[in-house]
Image: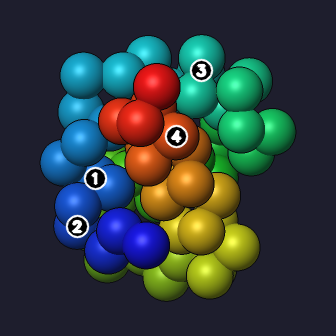
């Protein structure tokens, strides 16, 4: 599983609305998780984003 810092770095080139659609996460939660550094992020969000990025890497 990726750390939140790794997730933030890897999601920089992505369109967050597209990621929200593909992961089922609300765009507002995704944006807040990726763009705001001092935000508490739920484990489920980190897990979902980590799985998304790791699936993209292996594809």
Vertically, is 2 above or below 10?
A: below
Q: For the residue labelled by badge 2, is the local secondary structure a helix, a strand or a loop? A: helix
Residue situated in front as seen by the camera: 22 or 27: 22
Residue at x 33%, y 55% (from the top left corner) = 7
Q: Residue furthest front?
A: 58
Vertically, is 36 above or below 19?
A: below
Vertically, is 36 above or below 54?
A: below
User: Neighbour class for label 1 at 10 Å: few (<14), some, many (≥20)?
Assistant: some
Type of colouring: rainbow
Number of labelled discs?
4
Q: Cβ–Cβ below 8 Å for labels 2 and 1?
A: yes
Q: For the residue labelled by badge 1, is the local secondary structure a helix, a strand or a loop? A: helix
Q: For the residue labelled by badge 4, is the local secondary structure a helix, a strand or a loop? A: helix
Q: Reading the chain from its start, which is encountered first: label 1 or label 4?
A: 1
Name the residue beneath numbered marker 1.
8
Name the residue beneath numbered marker 4.
55
Vertically, is 23 above or below 34?
A: above
User: Neighbour class for label 2 at 10 Å: few (<14), some, many (≥20)?
Assistant: few
Q: Nearer the viewer, mark 1 or mark 4?
A: 4
Residue 22 in picture, x, y percent from top left:
71, 26
Residue at x 36%, y 22% (from the top left corner) = 14
Q: Nearer the viewer, mark 3 or mark 2?
A: 2
Q: CA distance from mark 3 to mark 4?
A: 18 Å
Name the residue beneath numbered marker 3.
17
Q: Is 27 situated left or right of 51 in this image?
A: right
Residue situated in front as seen by the camera: 26 or 45: 45
Name the residue beneath numbered marker 2.
5
Residue 32 in picture, x, y percent from top left:
49, 54
Q: Picture quarter containing residue 2?
A: bottom left
């Amino acid at each position: 599983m990726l750390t939140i810092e790794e997730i933030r770095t890897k999601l920089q080139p992505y369109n967050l609305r597209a990621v929200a659609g593909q992961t089922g996460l609300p765009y507002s939660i995704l944006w807040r998780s990726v763009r705001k550094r001092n935000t508490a992020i739920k484990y489920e969000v980190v897990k979902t984003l980590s799985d998304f990025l790791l699936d993209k890497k292996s594809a």
